[in-house]
Image (cartoon, rainbow, N blue to C red):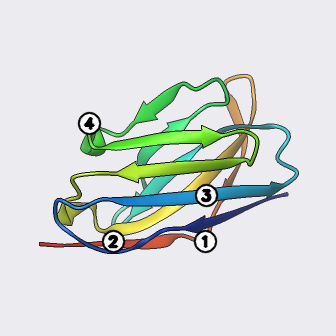
Amino acid sequence: QVQLVESGGGLVQAGGSLRLSCAASGSNGSINAMGWYRQTPGKPRELVVTITSGGITNVGAAVKGRFTISRDHASNTVYLQMNNLKPEDTAVYYCAADRTRGPVVITRYWGQGTQVTVSS
């Protein structure tokens, strides 16, 4: 099992910045990709950005150019730097970690979610 603990959410004005953190613990030796998804009520969870253990990123179109992800392998932590935030970025942000076998995701672990609210 892998446990993911998120921090850093909150309320910010439009144009501002926030940084989210997600620390993984437990049996995380076979974790490949880690990243962030977000969800608003009544909508499916959507990709924000992920990063593989090799540093390859996959960025959602809605956040491209504004959000960046980084990963500290020593502490098993990923960071999401969110700049130029917009009210439509308001959502619950979930950290995810994928156990993979080649290109196939065997298990996806989720954090508990952290609320990000952007006021106009």
Closer to the camera in the image, 19 or 58: 19
2 and 1 marks in contact (CB < 8 Å): no
SS for dot 2: loop
Name the mark on residue 9. Answer: none
Is tag 1's residue or tag 4's residue first in the polypeptide sequence? 4
Which amino acid lies under the numbered mark 3 shown in the image of this protein?
Cys
How far apart, in angstroms, are the residues tagged by discs 3 and 2? 25 Å
Which amino acid lies under the numbered mark 2 shown in the image of this protein?
Gly
1 and 4 marks in contact (CB < 8 Å): no
Is tag 3's residue or tag 2's residue first in the polypeptide sequence? 3
> Which residue in the structure is indicated by mark 3?
22
In the rendered image, which quarter contains the C terminus? Answer: bottom left
How far apart, in angstroms, are the residues tagged by discs 1 and 4? 26 Å
Nearer mark to the viewer, of 3 and 1: 3
Residue at x 42%, y 46% (from the top left corner): 47
> Which residue in the structure is indicated by mark 1?
112
Could you tell me residue 39's position as x and y percent? 40, 64
How far apart, in angstroms, are the residues tagged by discs 3 and 1? 10 Å
Nearer mark to the viewer, of 4 and 2: 4
Residue at x 34%, y 64% (from the top left corner): 43
Neighbourhood count class around disc 4 (C-alpha, 10 Å): few under 14, some 14–19, many 20 upward: few
SS for dot 4: loop
Nearer mark to the viewer, of 2 and 1: 1
In the rendered image, which quarter contains the N terminus? Answer: bottom right
Which amino acid lies under the numbered mark 1 shown in the image of this protein?
Gln
> Which residue in the structure is indicated by mark 2?
42
> Which residue in the structure is indicated by mark 4?
65
Give the residue at the far left of this rendering. Answer: 120
Nearer mark to the viewer, of 1 and 4: 4
Neighbourhood count class around disc 1 (C-alpha, 10 Å): few under 14, some 14–19, many 20 upward: some
